[in-house]
Image (tube, grey):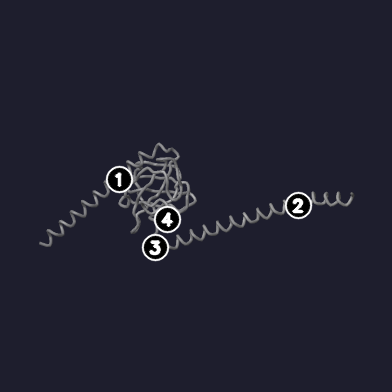
Amino acid sequence: MTPPLIHLAEAQKSAPVTDWAARIGWVVGLLVFVVFVYWLMRQGWKWRGTLQGDLPELPSTPDGLGEPKLTLSGRYHGSTTAGQWLDRIVARGLGTRSRAELTLTDQGLDVVRPGAEDFFVPAAALRGARLDKGIAGKVLPEGGLLVVTWRHGDKEIDSGFRSDRAGEHPAWVEALNQLSTTEHSTTEHHTSTTEHTETEGAR
């Protein structure tokens, strides 16, 4: 009777050891999978940045920015090709999510980002603003995102911001759309006047 009891005791002792080995194997396998997925994401990010390498340098804040119309503290959630909320732009640091301090003046929109690259959107480059709920894979409550559309080089860009006080968003949409409309009306009038003058001079 003794040998069978000994074998039974040994089997009971080896079972936990076997379970721990299986668990360790699962954990190691999971870690390898996570590292592999992270590596793929990094490679995709680099590849996307390479494809967008023709994006010009971002404008810097000009001297004499002027009197602020509005200011905002919140977060920058990313930029995409205008109208395509999943086509993320990562070149020139636009893919980096960060805190953001926004200042709107007659000169344009100044975006200060602690820990990331600042940029400036001239008034002439503004194409409007709207309330939305998602950009660059980030989804927020309906109307929880301030999306600013602007032109840089030959590309139109949507940039998403969320204020620490979401109730400020409608005022920003109104002010940005008004500045964009005013700027374009002025530009079109100037162009029309110039063309008319040149035509008269050629007669």
Picture disc at residue 17? 2
Marks 1 and 2, the one that precedes in the sequence: 2
* Among the two numbered marks 1 and 3 on one chain, the one whose residue lies closer to the N terminus: 3
Q: Which residue is mark 1?
A: 179
Q: Quadrant of residue 102?
A: top left
Residue under pointer 3: 54
Please name the amino acid that badge 3 sits on: Asp
Give the mark nearer the N terminus: 3 vs 2: 2
For disc 4, the marked residue is 89
Q: Nearer the viewer, mark 4 or mark 1?
A: 4
Is 39 situated left or right of 49 in this image?
right
Under mark 1, the amino acid is Leu
Q: Secondary structure at mark 3?
A: loop
The residue type indicated by label 2 comes to Val
Q: CA distance from mark 3 to mark 2?
A: 58 Å
Q: Quadrant of residue 141?
A: top left
Classify 10 Å Cα crowding around label 2: few (below 14), some (14-19), many (20 and above). few
Task: Tell me the kind of residue under disc 4.
Answer: Ile
Q: From the image, state whether disc 4 or disc 2 is nearer to you.
A: 2
Q: Position of residue 56 (x, y in %)?
A: 38, 60
Q: Position of residue 114 (x, y in %)?
A: 48, 49
Q: Nearer the viewer, mark 1 or mark 2?
A: 2
Element under disc 1: helix
Q: In the image as oriented, which residue stretches furthest toward the front?
A: 1
Relative height, residue 36 to residue 104 (above, below)? below
